[in-house]
Every structure is written in structure tokens, then in C-alpha cells.
Image (cartoon, rainbow, N blue to C red):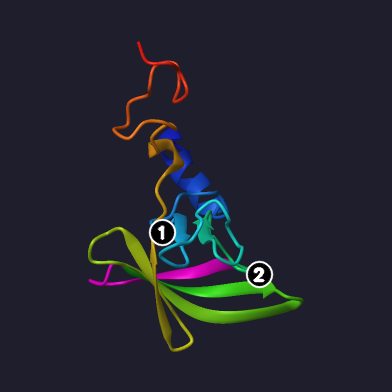
Amino acid sequence: MSARFLPLLAAALIPGLAVALPWDGTYRLSADADCGKVGEEGGALRIAGGQLQGVGSSCRMTQPVDVLDLDATLYVMECTGEGQTWTERAMIMGTAEGEGIFLLWRGYAFRYDRCPDPADASPPGSEDGTETPGGPDAPAD
């Protein structure tokens, strides 16, 4: 077997590799949600590595089907939470602005805006993204 086919063979034989999906990220459950509280009331939900972590439940996102021309993916969600296990179909679709998602589930459509990336946050005491020399409590020169 030619060495050039080995990566293709490996990809076909190992479907469980962790791959970033287009929906991976942390999303606000409401406008005033705390993005640092994933899976908690008043916090956020997270999609990462084929898992959706919500308030009180977690779902494995399986059998993805791209929905043509909609920037959307249909999944079979294998969920556990509050002592129960269930399977549902759900669709995740990007917002027109590209800053969030719609989650369509059991006749409901939810819009969630993406939380800011913590790496993009300004340091404390800095409104313009530049760090204040000596920190916010340092005496002025």
C-alpha cells in the first residue's frame, strides 16, 4: 500500500477523533448571561467536540447531516440529565450575522449569541485594550 493512502485510511478507520465543528463555542442563554457559568442557570451552553452541555443536561451530537443552503446541521442528540436518558433530533443553524446560532428542538427555536473569547478580553483597568502600566491602582506619573 502506498504511503500516500495511509492518512485517508486512518481517517476512515478512526471516526471518533476529536475535530472542531463549525458550532463549537460558548453561547449566552440570555442577554445578561454569565459566560463563565457553563451549564448553570443564568449562564451559558457550550458545544465542543461533538458534545452540547446545557443547564442540567449534556447531549452527544451524532449522525450529522448538512442542510444545504441553510448553514445548518441536523443531529441526533443522545442526551442525559436529571436522572434520565433520551434521544431527540435537533438542528443547529448559524445566524445571518454569524455571531450566534439557532437551536431548533421539539418545535421551538432558540437564538443564542456567541460569548466573547476570553483571550480577546481587555485586561482590568484598560478600556482601549492596552494595559495600564503598573496596573489600574498604580499612581499616575
Residue 61 place in picture, x, y as percent: 53, 67
Q: Are marks 1 and 2 in contact (CB under 8 Å)?
A: no
Q: Main secondary structure of the magenta part?
A: strand
Query: Circle 2 sits in a helix, a strand or a loop, which is it?
Result: loop
Earlier along the polypeptide chain: callout 1 or callout 2?
1
| Residue 23: numbered disc | 1
- Residue that extends furthest to the bottom in the rendered view of this protein: 107
Q: Which residues are magenta?
A: 60-71
Indicate whether residue 90 is drawn in magenta: no
Q: Position of residue 46 (x, y in %)?
A: 52, 58
Categorize mark 2 by other alpha carbons within 10 Å: few (<14), some (14-19), many (20+).
Answer: few
Q: How many residues crowd mark 1 within 10 Å: few (<14), some (14–19), many (20+)?
A: many
- Please state, as top left, top right, bottom left or bottom right, where the C terminus lies in the image: top left
Alpha carbons under labels 1 and 2: distance apart: 20 Å
Looking at the image, is 52 positioned above or below residue 103? above
As for residue 65 lying within the magenta part, the answer is: yes
In the image, 1 versus 49, the foreground residue is: 49
Query: Which residue is located at x 40 percent, y 38 percent?
Result: 121
Residue at point 38%, 22% (across, down): 132
| Residue kind at label 1, given as amino acid type | Trp
Residue at horizontal 73 percent and vertical 75 percent from the top: 82
Q: Which is nearer the eye, 104 or 21?
A: 104
Q: Which residue is mark 2?
A: 56
Q: Amino acid at mark 2?
A: Gly
Residue 79 at x, y percent in the picture = 63, 73
Q: Nearer the viewer, residue 19 or 14?
A: 19
Which of the two residues, 64 or 36, is positioned nearer the viewer here?
Answer: 36
> In this image, 119 relative to 17: left or right?
left
